[in-house]
Amino acid sequence: MMRSASRLIVLIIAALPAAAVAQTLARYAIVGDGIPEPLTGQPGDPTRGRALVLARSSTCILCHFGPFPEARFQGDLAPSLAGAGSRSTPAQLRLRLVDASQVNPDTIMPSYYRIDGLTRVGSAWRDKPILSAEQIEDIVAYLATLRE
Amino acid sequence: MRPQALLAAALLGMALPVLAGEIAPSGRRSGYDFMSADSKAMQDDDTANPAMLSVLEGETLWTTKAGAADKSCSDCHGAVDVSMKGVAARYPAFSAASAAPVDLGQRVNLCRRQHQEADPFAPESRELLALTALIAKQSRGMPITAGGDPRLASSVARGRELFVQRQGQLNLACANCHDDNWDKHLAGSAITQGQPTGYPIYRLEWQGMGSLQRRLRGCMTGIRAQAFDFDAPDMIALELYLMSRAHGMTMDAPAVRP
């Protein structure tokens, strides 16, 4: 809670001079080790989520591999996504996607729904989260189906 | 590291301890080692290595008179295989004229301006790649020595700082991949240690030649960072750090890379 509250303040301050460019992020509350409520107020679509996980622009399988027989190039920089839904609850998956650094401060996994605390972001990507709230929810819905 | 520790290390003449995550000298490997047998064979055979076309072009330029001075490189430097032997292995180097480190391309352009009185070549131009490929070839098989000059110390330190700093929308540091995960794969590609031994290179993905600066801009854009401009001081610092990190490694320029 503390951290997301201070993040919000940072966001507001940072947004003042560049209000036109900065995108506002949906508010969310971290409870324990997760974000229990969907960022969009409604559950995502697992089919769209699977397509997103495989999409190059989402970057997931640059690092991860998983049960994706059609994807020729997958990374081995990160653990398999197979069984992700058995190891974590949807709330934990949501926090991991929104801001993995809150789960593991040293992680190399990007924070997909965070725009503060970043350095030298390219102009095409500045002040935008990597994924939208809808996309995060779709991916959470999909990952939750990966059970073993 | 504290200044006293540095001093002590220097006094004792011992190697500085390896920082966490840094690759030990004996563990360093050129990008060549990670390539497929086909790509290795292409690099090893001068008649198959496409970068040699650029070297040939460089040989022509080397003896072509240019500029208001109407002088060729060879008019002053003579045979390239004598005068430029080992030169690329010690660049970026400190330039008294610029009071800053300059990389090999910038050094060539200093001669264009001061000694040939001609316009400098644009970054990544055919001419600049050709001349740097020609000069780099004269360091093939020689150990990298760049970075030792004390006047470069602050720039090496700046380069290291940039190398370990998280950046871009993906919030990754060069070191996250090239020090900590070099034996792994990003999607299909071997990450490698990001060693600068082969530049300029013929890159299969580009289907053309490119400098180390172009390669670094590619990695920066890959993590969605604002890439440094060509020849920006931070770009040179990063090149310099990479070369000092590769101290003692064998040059294999002009290399082929995937």
Image (cartoon, coloured by chain):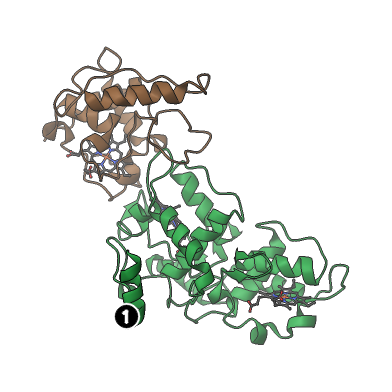
Chain colours: A brown, B green
- Where is the N terminus of chain A found, in terms of image quarters? top left
Between B138 and B107, the residue placed more toward the observer is B107
Q: Amino acid at mark 1?
A: Met
Instruction: Name the chain letter of the residue that bears numbered label 1.
Output: B
Q: So how many labels did they put on this image?
A: 1
User: Which secondary structure, mark 1?
Assistant: loop
Between A92 and A117, the residue placed more toward the observer is A117
Residue B53 seen from this side: no
Quarter of image, res A38: top left
Q: Is residue B38 left or right of residue B54?
A: left
Between B100 and B72, the residue placed more toward the observer is B100
The x and y percentages for residue B135 are 63, 75
Between A10 and B84, the residue placed more toward the observer is A10
The x and y percentages for residue B105 are 64, 65
Q: Residues within 10 Å of mark 1 (few under 14, many from 20)?
A: few
Q: Is residue A110 left or right of residue B252?
A: left
Residue picked out by circle 1: B14
The x and y percentages for residue B74 are 76, 81
Q: Is residue B12 above or below residue B42?
A: below
Q: Is residue B63 left or right of residue B160?
A: right
The x and y percentages for residue B249 are 43, 76
Q: Is residue A51 above or below residue B211?
A: above
Residue B71 seen from this side: yes
